[in-house]
Amino acid sequence: MNDPLMKLKNSMKKTVFKDFSFSDERKNAVKEAIRSNQSQQQYNTWKAETIMAVLGSVQQQPMQGYDISIQLFQKGELIFQNNEGQLYTLLHLLENKEILTSSWSDNKKHYALTPKGKKYLAAYKQDNSHQPVSLKHLLEEASLWAQQNLKNF
Amino acid sequence: MNELELMAVTEENMMDEREQIIDHLMHEYSDDILHLAYTYVKNRTTAEDLTQEIFIKCYEKLNQFNQQATMKTWLYRIAINHCKDYLKSWHYRKIMLNDKILDWIPSKSTHVEKEIITKIEENSLTDAVMNLPLKYREIVYLHYYEELPLAEISKITSVNINTIKTRLKRAKELLKDRMIKEV
């Protein structure tokens, strides 16, 4: 049986797809997007331990960013060493996600755990062997959020 | 070199490797993906934009690729889902459809004549296929243009193989009707 659809490939190549290919400029645009994505990711993925160390340090009492960084350093969490700015990015993010709350006194911003933050911390401590699902979710959300924010800059 | 630096280097290499994979995929399949996207959105610029996004998406999801499928199947799946998401998007439904309505208003321009000539030459089969409802169009395209076996189409579209057979049959009936009407 002669199937007229056998001619489809030829027909399309001569019509809708004629002189229609993915240009080098377009390919380069993809490569550029990938590269900028790489540099974003390097700065914006947090380890669960880091987040939990931050939450742990404000567990007892509200603290300002500087004191948190000192505490982290004492605990041996060195990720923010020579890179303190990133701590504030993370604090903002956690505040935005309602894991931390903040208040101003003495012209300084003090961070404290919200009930949601306490829950995360408790869940993490209880189950240290593997990441609680909610935290994994948070981490993914965190990097997404950071990416979107970067795009707005 | 301490451990931290070493980790940073391997990370970098991995980045390079992922970039190379995308590079290779683009080299091999970018025209195919572009044409595939066109059959969904019927607009060259939109198809180009979507293709660009599809490869970026692949890069982001590369770590989710499991060896069960071939890379091509995986790429096509991402592409098709992305095109369908676009067709469902607010932007398409509200903005592109308005443009489409404009297309329906008869134009007085000179290329009407040209349009008619090309139509007579080659277009009728392509046109008929492109005007099929999406669920038939995609299967006809994948089977007759991409020459993919039905089992493969089933994997790519997540549609049951028997459903695909039915749709293919129905698509042929529809095409027959339309081609006859045109002649």
Image: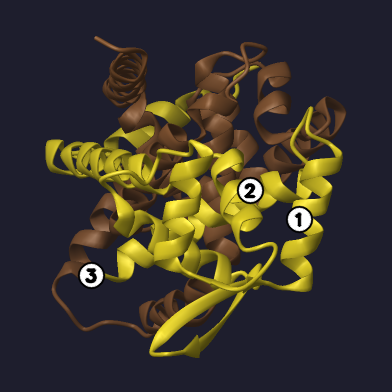
Chain colours: A yellow, B brown
Residue B171 in the image: state x and y as whole percent.
70, 42
Q: Residues within 10 Å of mark 1 (few under 14, many from 20)?
A: many
Q: Residues within 10 Å of mark 3 (few under 14, many from 20)?
A: few
Residue at (68, 35) in percent of width and height? B157
Mark closer to the chain start, 2 or 1: 2
Q: Name the chain letter of the residue that bears numbered label 2.
A: A
Alpha carbon distance from label 2 to label 3? 67 Å
Mark 1 vs mark 3: tell me if same chain. Answer: no
In screen coordinates, is A8 left or right of B31? Answer: right
Does the residue at mark 2 contact the one at mark 1 (Cβ under 8 Å)? yes
Instruction: Report which residue position mark 3 lands on.
Output: B112
Q: Quadrant of residue A95?
A: bottom right
For badge 3, the amino acid type reads Val
Instruction: Please identify the quadrant where the N terminus of chain A is shown.
Output: top right
Residue at (28, 49) in percent of width and height? A83
For badge 2, the amino acid type reads Met
Which one is nearer the viewer's eye here, A41 or A121? A121
- Establish if B169 lies above or below A56: above
Alpha carbon distance from label 1 to label 3? 65 Å
Q: Name the chain letter of the residue that bears numbered label 3.
A: B
Asked whether residue B163 is in view, the answer is yes
In screen coordinates, is A61 left or right of B122? Answer: right
Asked whether residue B126 is in view, the answer is no
Q: Secondary structure at mark 2?
A: helix
User: Any mark on residue A52, and which?
Assistant: 2
Instruction: Report which residue position mark 1 lands on.
Output: A120
Which one is nearer the viewer's eye here, B99 or B130? B99
Residue B144 in the image: state x and y as whole percent.
55, 26
Does the residue at mark 2 contact the one at mark 3 (Cβ under 8 Å)? no
